[in-house]
Image: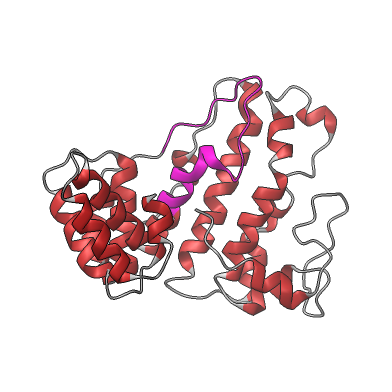
Amino acid sequence: MVDAIVRQDNPALWAEFRRLSDTLSDGADLVLRLDFNICYHHATHHEALPALERILAWAEQAELDDSDRIILAEYLLNIRDDADGARQYVEGVEQPSTYRWSGGSQWKNLAPFVQRIRLNRLMVTLGIEIDLVAAVPEAQDPKERGNVLFERHLVIIASLWGKAKRRRLSGSEIVHTLHSALRLYQRRHKETRDWRAWYEIESAANDYFDFLIRAVAAHGEEGVGKLNPFNPAFGFCRLDRGNEPFERETFSNSRKSRQESVC
């Protein structure tokens, strides 16, 4: 119910919800959820700043996990443009462990990797340098090699996105940064046949490239044109296998459909 209410840009409805929540035993939790949703969905709304102030007051008394800290740091950047405050919350947050694949696991939209994506995008935005090998260490088991490569490329893409808030890169710089990321799936069977659950990583190709496109779009139209083989500005050699990063559609529609956040 809270999620449905907050998706409407209706401060009067939000205020009425707070009033009614005062009569409920779990009212404080509901109001806190409302404030989090306002900050997430309406970061530029005038109600976002007081909502953030209430969240920060709650955070002073709460035991925050790494996910909480990342979210609060994002809100401080997006709503108050407070880089120093964001750094205080992200300080000490560790890179997530490499995801362990299990038989029959099903997920969409890169769900197991959201925290890694958000953390590394945030760190780069704040000017914090990332050591790719330290962020995603090499696995002791050679069968986990595919997992390591996949997550390292997620860090590369997330870092590219984070740089957009500091300085927009040129199309050529973007192409150079994403050279290996665009070819992640161009591997011979004899290389991947012993990699554990590589088929699951392959099944995530659409979400992976959707994430990549959104990161590029954050840098503006030039970078998107450089990577879109169906656009006259195309500046990258055509991939010779499936999983093209762009479906065949008009350039303007592709650009418009990729602007929303990955998470």
Answer above or below: position of 162 versus 58. Answer: below
- How many labels, in total? 0
Residue 184: percent from the left, percent from the top?
A: 71, 46
Does residue 105 appear to the left or right of 233 in the view shown? Answer: left
Q: Is residue 18 left or right of residue 126?
A: left
Question: Chief secondary structure of the magenta span?
Answer: loop
Q: x%, y% of residue 75? A: 31, 61
Residue pictured at 36% horizontal, 52% vertical: 2
Q: In the shown orientation, is residue 18 left or right of residue 166?
A: left
Highlighted magenta segment, given as a residue range? 96-120
Residue 132, given in percent of the width and then of the height, sits at 49, 46
Residue in front for this viewpoint, 79 or 95: 79
Taking depth in this image into account, of 52 and 96 the one nearest to the observer is 52
Q: Residue at x 58, y 35 (%)?
A: 148
- Farthest right residue? 240
Left or right, 129 with reference to 65: right
**Way the structure is coloured:** secondary structure
